[in-house]
């Protein structure tokens, strides 16, 4: 099922037996899915207004690339105040992706560069195909990351690798990118979307409170001093395990009616 979206450059569909997975497609292939202001705001609005039936989302790009980053044709002479507000607009939109209602899985191919990498790093899982490459051309364009990249990207690959990418223009190919930590899954060319959808359908089966804890509690616990983190963990664990759904799931396992843990 396709839904009306706030911009022609973004498309929203629903997949799964109960339409539980939202599929968000950047739909601006002629411009390599470069993110203009309208597209960033549409992304924010879309994640703010996902139907309550949705339990997970996939984001991917039309054409040969995931996303070429900031639409450079909109980059004008901004004064410091305008630049600040523009960057804060990106922050607000990507916050909606990271701390929105559901886990988001990015299906990556081709260019994942600049703001495209910032968008991918706001997602919870990244699946890359063999054509994927990662770069931060901001360094050579005389600008800096502004979409939360300086906070999120070092959490994936470390400060040293990000510094190198921006200083030298280094481009990571898909296998090196997976080893560096950009993506958790590497699949053959053309298969990133199918793998991401498979994972999203699985994620959508989790108890909603568990997904909530992973999206909202885990990254905050990771930022807390250990003694505070342990307490937050205990509070979250107590809330999650008190949900009726958690009790049903544990009962099902004890009754031999739930899957065992096994390797695939
Ligand atoms: C664009 C953009 C863009 C393509 N803004 N128009 N990002 C960059 O510095 C990356 C710039 N893009 C590229 O390096 C290449 O376009 C790609 C490697 C992504 C793809 O190459 P290719 O050969 O497939 O496409 P192309 O011929 O370069 O581009 C096709 C069209 O898309 C062309 O327009 P046309 O009217 O001549 O057909 C390009 O101008 C256009 N296009 N990328 C605007 N980014 C919150 S701060 C974030 C800061 C950043 O993201 S800085 C990094 C910006």
Image (cartoon, grey):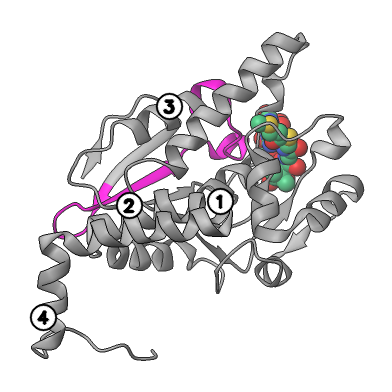
Q: Nearer the viewer, mark 4 or mark 1?
A: 1
Is the CB of mark 3 within 8 Å of ligand 1? no
Q: How dense is the environment of label 3, judged by Cα within 10 Å: few (below 14), some, or many (20 and up)?
A: some
Of labels 2 and 4, earlier in sequence is 2
Q: Are marks 2 and 3 in contact (CB under 8 Å)?
A: no
Q: Indicate which label's residue lies in the foreground, 1 or 3.
A: 1
Residue on which the image places disc 2:
212
Q: Secondary structure at mark 4?
A: helix
Q: Which residues are magenta?
A: 14-39
Q: Residues within 10 Å of mark 4 (few under 14, many from 20)?
A: few
Residue occupied by mark 1? 224
The residue that disc 4 covers is 252
Left or right of 157, for residue 199: left
Q: Which mark is residue 42?
A: 3
Q: Residue at x 63, y 55 (%)?
A: 110
Residue at left offset 61%, top offset 40%: 32
Instruction: Note whether ligand 1 is within 8 Å of mark 2.
Output: no
**What residue is rendered at 71% in x and 26% in y?**
72
Q: Position of residue 209 (x, y in %)?
A: 26, 55
């Amino acid at each position: 099922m396709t839904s009306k979206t706030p911009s022609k450059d973004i498309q929203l569909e629903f997949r799964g037996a109960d339409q539980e997975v939202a599929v968000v497609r950047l739909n601006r292939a002629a411009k390599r899915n470069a993110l203009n202001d309208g597209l960033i705001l549409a992304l924010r609005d879309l994640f703010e207004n996902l139907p309550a039936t949705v339990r997970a989302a996939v984001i991917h790009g039309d054409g040969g690339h995931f996303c070429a980053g900031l639409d450079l044709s909109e980059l004008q002479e901004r004064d410091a105040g305008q630049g600040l507000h523009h960057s804060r607009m990106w922050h607000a939109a990507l916050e909606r992706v990271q701390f929105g209602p559901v886990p988001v899985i990015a299906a990556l191919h081709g260019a994942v560069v600049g703001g495209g990498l910032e968008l991918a790093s706001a997602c919870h899982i990244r699946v890359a195909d063999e054509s994927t490459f990662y770069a931060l051309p901001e360094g050579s364009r005389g600008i800096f990351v502004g979409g939360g990249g300086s906070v999120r990207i070092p959490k994936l690959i470390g400060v040293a690798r990000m510094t190198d990418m921006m200083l030298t223009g280094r481009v990571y190919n898909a296998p090196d990118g997976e080893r560096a930590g950009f993506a958790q899954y590497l699949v053959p060319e053309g298969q990133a979307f199918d793998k991401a959808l498979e994972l999203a359908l699985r994620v959508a089966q989790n108890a909603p409170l568990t997904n909530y804890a992973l999206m909202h509690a885990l990254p905050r616990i990771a930022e807390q001093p250990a003694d505070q983190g342990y307490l937050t963990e205990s509070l979250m664990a107590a809330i999650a395990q008190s949900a009726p759904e958690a009790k049903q799931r544990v009962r099902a396992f004890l009754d031999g009616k739930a899957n065992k843990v096994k390797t695939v």
